[in-house]
Image: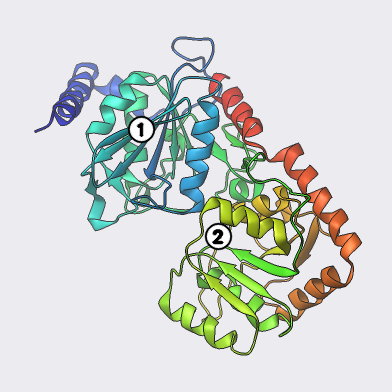
Amino acid sequence: MTAARCIGSANIKWHAHLARDHGQDARATFQEPMRYGSTHRNGGPPGRVLHIVPALFGHDDGVVGGAERYALELARHMAEETPTTLVSFGDRERHETVGELKIHVIGAPWYVRGQRTNPVSLSLISELRKADVVHCHQQHVLASSLAAVVGKFTGRRVFVSDLGGGGWDVSAYVSTDRWYRGHLHISEYSRMTFGQAGKPWAHVILGGVDTAKFSPDETARRDGTVLFVGRLLPHKGVNDLVSGIAPDMPLELIGQAGDPKFLEDLKALAAGKRVTFRHDCNDAELVQAYRKALCVVLPSVYKTMYGAESRVPELLGQTLLEGMACGTPAICTDVASMPEVVEDGVTGFVVPPNDGAALDQKLRWLRDHPEEARTMGEAARRRVLENFTWPQVVRRCLEVYSA
């Protein structure tokens, strides 16, 4: 048994001993609904913040996904304001530093029921003991429930953001909503979808973009390419974009193929059209693609081409924000959170879902009205700067942490 696991085991025993000593009082404390706004046990500013995410963002042994990038970027920028650590899980134990942010990847975790998106380890408890505030990314995983329970027994403030992932968890049998001091949603749609609209402990913090990295370049020439960025999955509605786009318009699809059958179907739809598939693209190449594009498109749907239903296809629409930060107009479907990001007719267009003809119409309009498209791109950049920067998201979080 490693030293970290010994510490974890000792803490489990300590919490069990605490429950026995307090008897019914401990159970009552656990069951009492959490009230957002309670004073921190130490008072004052947030202190040491711990972020927990199932997998670290990265192209090597991490995961290249929106949820993982969100957690990393929020923690990285928060570290510039208050001591912050990001804990994740992986095949090997390691410690890293990114700027002011400390990263601890807990090695060889237990993957609950074999689910790679649901790792947990007793070593997590030793990290929880060092923190004043804990921010879990993904509610419906066992690591978050463990953090919430430890927070209840030790007086730590534990918050959670649901980023659309999960696995087997006790929340499948009992609501864990009030186990957390507060829920920090990345869109108003998220707060409504999870039935927390109007709840005093449910807050909207939005999402952010690194506006220094994702920025316009006046020397970059717009080449008329229509751009999609994201995993190639049926609920992303990429098939509507491929089938709807005119044969003479170039389309670039950047993203990993998450569904082999869907990829093959997309390639069949793309036959005879100017469609390019790019499955491996670093950040520098991605920024250049945004800067050169006519527009960025996210055509997600509630109902896929195979008839499957997707209740929550997008909780934010991160790639829209990245493209807009680069001064590129955005087109999205009237689905989920995306109309909160794209202002129809100002920063781009919002079209009906499952409608390739509507997408084609707006794409042709942008191509045929370059000055108006440029104005939309400038408005898109302003909208990001006014609402969707990481320092703004950090400030919203810190205000909630400290309330």
Residue type for callout 2: Val
Q: Please give the label number shown on residue 96.
A: 1
Please name the residue shown 15% across and 24% down the image.
10
Secondary structure at badge 2 equals loop
Could you tell me which residue is drawn at 32 percent across and 46 percent down? 170
Above or below residue 175? Residue 397 is above
Considering depth in this image, is 99 or 390 the residue closer to the camera?
A: 99
- Badge 1 or badge 2: first in the primary sequence: 1
Element marked by disc 1: strand
What's the CA distance linking mark 1 and mark 2? 34 Å
Q: Quadrant of residue 320?
A: bottom right
**Quarter of the figure that contains the C terminus:** top right
Counting from the top left corner in percent of width and height, residue 45 is at 54, 14
- At label 1, the amino acid type is Glu
The front one of 66 and 163 is 66
Q: Which residue is mark 2?
A: 312
Q: Position of residue 286 (x, y in %)?
A: 59, 56
Q: Which circle, 1 or 2, is nearer the viewer?
A: 1
**Please, is residue 273 above or below residue 330 in the view?**
below
Residue 316 appears left or right of 22: right
